[in-house]
Image (cartoon, rainbow, N blue to C red):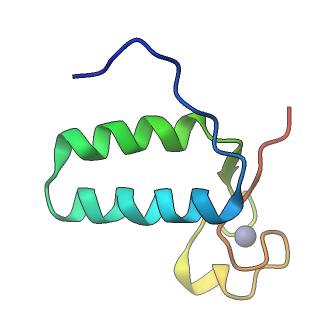
Amino acid sequence: MMNAAPLPRTTDPDSFRALCEALEQAESSDQLERAEVLRAMVDAAAFCQCPECDDKPDRRAECATCNGDGFVPESD
Ligand SMILES: [Zn+2]
């Protein structure tokens, strides 16, 4: 159940990375409601997937655009 409060906008890269890991874990363990909430938080965060490596594990490691993070600060 989602409440109507606005989601916090994650602006800290470490927090965002933790959020992504939690989402991945929730999805891989079939915690669908938890994954849905986490996905909404990832979407609301001030970061987006790296356009250079698409967060692909094999390309991410050597990516200079995101420095191996797989995500970049969202530009507006
Ligand atoms: Zn990248």
Q: Position of residue 10 (x, y in %)?
A: 64, 44
Q: Is residue 9 left or right of residue 52?
A: left
Indicate the quadrant where residue 71 lies.
bottom right
Q: Is residue 2 left or right of residue 50?
A: left
Q: Quadrant of the N terminus?
A: top left
Report the residue at 69% width, 61% height from top. Answer: 13
Report the residue at 40% width, 11% height from top. Answer: 4
Report the residue at 78% width, 43% height from top. Answer: 74
Report the residue at 78% width, 70% height from top. Answer: 66
Nearer-the-camera pick, 6 or 27: 6
Does residue 52 sit above or below 30 in this rendering? below
Indicate the quadrant where residue 54 lies.
bottom right
Q: Quadrant of the C terminus?
A: top right
Q: Position of residue 60 (x, y in %)?
A: 65, 79
Question: Dividing the image into four equal quarters, which quarter contains ligand 1?
Answer: bottom right
Does residue 29 sit above or below 56 in this rendering? above
Q: Residue furthest top?
A: 4
Q: How many marks?
A: 0
Q: Position of residue 62 (x, y in %)?
A: 74, 88
Nearer-the-camera pick, 65 or 20: 20
Q: Position of residue 27 (x, y in %)?
A: 25, 57
